[in-house]
Amino acid sequence: MTSNNDNEKNLEELLLQTEVLLSKTVDIWQEEQRQKEGVKNRVSGGYYMMSRAAEKDLRALYRANSNASLIFSVMRENMQIGTNAITISNIALSKILKVSKRTVIRATKYLQDHQYVQVIKVGTTNTYIVNEQVAFAGSVGQGKAVFSTTVVAHEHEQGEG
């Protein structure tokens, strides 16, 4: 009888240890999933790619319109992987670069006219899609119309409260 009780206690202890191990394994797996979700839309290391020809075009852009070049730099810095998109207001761009809103409007128009970006109106702000022939964060030739975006909201755009 004692032998059966000892075996039962051993089995119960093994079961408890197995349940604890399983619980720890599930916790580790869930944490790994949370970490993967957190970096899903980011390029590893924060990189994006450009062709050598595009690099030459950027120098020409800087010479032709330095404000457009600076704004394009902010767009590339913040564009989302897989979409090359960024939603940002003219006010936010003007505050980030310390230029007037009118300067931002002229510069973004220049970028659109010279096919550096495509502009999609979103209410009273714009979503800019960076031309993937210039720079991209994701796969070349995606050709998608449906996208998510990184939204940049500057503190000066927020109400008090």
Image (tube, rainbow, N blue to C red):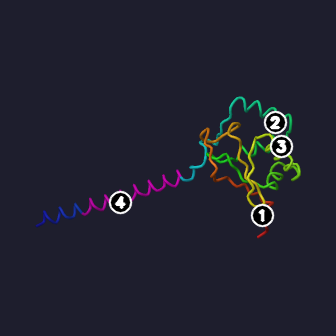
Does the CB distance between marks 3 and 4 fall below 8 Å? no
Residue position marked by numbered label 4 in the rendering: 20
Q: What is the secondary structure assignment of the residue under circle 1?
A: loop
Viewer-side residue, 161 vs 150:
150
- Whichever of labels 2 and 1 marks the residue nearer the N terminus, that label is 2
Give above or below for 125 relative to 82: below
**Residue at the spot of label 1:** 158
Q: Residue at x 73, y 33 (%)?
A: 54
Mark 1 vs mark 3: which is more N-terminal?
3
Q: Is residue 45 left or right of residue 55?
A: left
Q: Residues within 10 Å of mark 1 (few under 14, many from 20)?
A: few
Residue at position x 25%, y 63% from top?
12
- Frontmost of labels 4 and 2 is 2
Label 3 near label 1: C-beta < 8 Å? no
Mark 2 belongs to which amino acid? Answer: Leu
For disc 2, the neighbor class at 10 Å (few under 14, some 14 to 19, many from 20) is: many
User: Do the CB atoms of the residues marked 2 and 1 lie less than 8 Å apart?
Assistant: no
- Residue 161 screen position, x and y as percent: 76, 70
Find disc 2 in the rendering and name its residue: 61
> Closer to us: mark 1 or mark 3?
3
- Residue 34 lies in the magenta-colored region: yes
User: Callout 3: helix, strand or loop?
Assistant: helix
Task: Give the alpha-carbon distance from disc 4 to disc 2, as whole Å.
Answer: 61 Å
Locate the N terminus by quadrant: bottom left
Q: CA distance from mark 2 to mark 1?
A: 32 Å
Which callout, 4 or 2, points at the residue further toward the start of the chain? 4
Say which residue appears at 85% left-offset and 34% top-offset.
63
